[in-house]
């Protein structure tokens, strides 16, 4: 209850996991990568999180994946809501806000447990990222933005709007169509 987990119970065995926040952010980036198929995303998750994944029997993969997602989600309900953030796009806003909450530069330390990083993340207040996230959440729920919020959104559209993740083929097709329309 008060310990930071360093292993997950899967198939009656304790499996050591990599708990540094960078490993989990790599997994989350894979989850959002449109170039990866679902099986590839699961493989990145399992291979990056479990230290001895190569020794894990195939029959445990689903249970291991479920345990991994629960660890990453810190016991949340796991139900995806509307997309209001992107770890890669938002990184330039997230890290200064997390650093402020932590009181130090988190990227400068050799190791920081994912749950500790997530705790700092959850304590982000009074930051550009908190403002952007609040506006995205408000829009996702269909709420009307106040005048000052609309002004902020318009002045900072580049950081407020979530960019679509396109595969290379989709990006090439989009580029081709834009060239035709010019």
Image: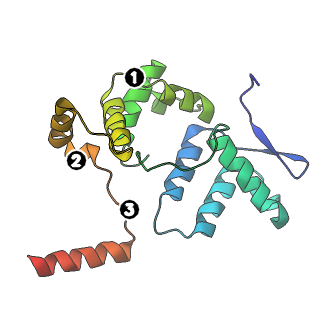
Q: Nearer the viewer, residue 155 or 21?
A: 155
Residue furthest top in the image: 103
Which mark is first along the chain, 3 or 2? Answer: 2
- Above-or-below relation of 37 to 60: below
Residue furthest left in the image: 182
Q: CA distance from mark 1 to mark 3?
A: 27 Å
Tell whether 173 sits left or right of 47: left
Q: Position of residue 102 (x, y in %)?
A: 48, 21
- Identify the residue at image location x=40%, y=70%: 167
Q: Nearer the viewer, residue 146 or 86?
A: 146
- Above-or-below relation of 23 to 172: above
What residue is disc 2 on? 158
Q: CA distance from mark 1 to mark 2?
A: 21 Å
**Element marked by disc 3:** loop
Q: Position of residue 44 (x, y in %)?
A: 61, 59
Give the mark count: 3
**Mark 2 near mark 3, Cβ–Cβ under 8 Å?**
no
- Identify the residue at image location x=56%, y=27%: 119
What residue is disc 1 on? 125
Residue 18: in sight, yes or no? Answer: no
- Identify the residue at image location x=40%, y=45%: 84
Q: Position of residue 144 (x, y in %)?
A: 27, 39
What residue is disc 3 on? 165
Circle 2 crowding by C-alpha within 10 Å: few under 14, some 14–19, many from 20: few
Instruction: Report which quarter residue 131 is drawn in.
Output: top left
Q: CA distance from mark 2 to mark 3?
A: 15 Å
**Mark 1 near mark 2, Cβ–Cβ under 8 Å?**
no
The C terminus: image quadrant: bottom left
Q: Nearer the viewer, residue 51 or 181?
A: 181
Residue furthest front in the image: 143
């Amino acid at each position: 209850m008060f310990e930071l987990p360093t292993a997950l119970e899967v198939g009656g065995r304790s499996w050591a996991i990599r708990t540094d926040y960078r490993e989990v952010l790599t997994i989350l980036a894979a989850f959002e990568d449109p170039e990866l198929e679902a099986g590839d995303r699961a493989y990145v998750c399992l291979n990056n999180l479990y230290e001895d994944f190569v020794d894990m029997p195939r029959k445990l993969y689903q249970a291991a994946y479920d345990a991994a997602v629960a660890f990453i989600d810190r016991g949340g309900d796991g139900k995806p809501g509307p997309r209001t953030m992107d770890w890669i796009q938002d990184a330039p806003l997230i890290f200064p806000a997390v650093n402020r909450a932590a009181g130090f530069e988190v990227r400068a330390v050799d190791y920081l447990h994912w749950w500790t990083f997530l705790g700092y993340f959850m304590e982000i207040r009074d930051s550009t990222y908190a403002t952007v996230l609040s506006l995205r959440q408000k829009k996702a729920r269909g709420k009307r933005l106040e005048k000052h919020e609309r002004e902020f959104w318009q002045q900072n559209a580049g950081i407020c709007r979530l960019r679509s993740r396109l595969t290379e083929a989709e990006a090439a097709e989009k580029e081709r169509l834009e060239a035709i329309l010019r």
